Image: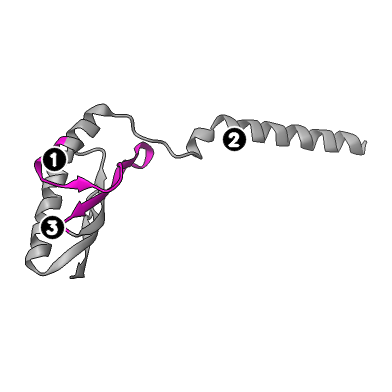
Amino acid sequence: MRWYRYLSILGIMSIVIGLIMSNSTFLTKQVIYNPSFLNKLEFSLQSNNLTLSKSPDCQEFLDFCRLSIRSGNHDFIAMISTNNDPFFQIASLQKILKIATMNGKHAEFIDLSSLRPYATLKNN
């Protein structure tokens, strides 16, 4: 009678593991393959004279794209939303950089992906 109990537990465990493995896409990192968004992003970066330090890390299921940008002698991280037009977000980013430079600071982290965008600045 005990071996029936172990067999039923083993069966339940195999079903649970099978369900987890079939939905493993939720456990792995997904990269956005939206060529329209990436083309607009590349164009807006070029038109605002910003260069990327690394390739963009876009995650479709989180609706943001992480950019490592070089501005002058400093690198900083910028987060932009994949739901909004990248041209307007990069223009806002350029405006933040201009204000930071006028105040003698440089950007370390700028988040434009959320409903409440913010920037972390550091003195030169």
Q: Is residue 59 magenta?
A: yes
Looking at the rendered structure, the kind of residue marked 3 is: Leu
Q: Which region is colored magenta?
A: 43-72
Tell me the distance, in whole angstroms, between the alpha carbons under discs 2 and 1. 43 Å
Residue at x 24%, y 33% (from the top left corner): 38
Location of mark 3 (residue): 97
* Discs 2/3, front: 3
Looking at the rendered structure, the kind of residue marked 1 is: Gln
Tell me residue 106's x, y (percent). Answer: 18, 64
**Of callouts 2 and 1, the N-terminal one:** 2
Residue 25, compared with residue 50, is above or below; it is above
Label at residue 20? 2
Label at residue 46? 1
Tell me the distance, in whole angstroms, between the alpha carbons under discs 2 and 3. 45 Å
**Of callouts 3 and 1, the N-terminal one:** 1
Tell me residue 88's x, y (percent). Answer: 12, 42
Q: Secondary structure at mark 3?
A: helix
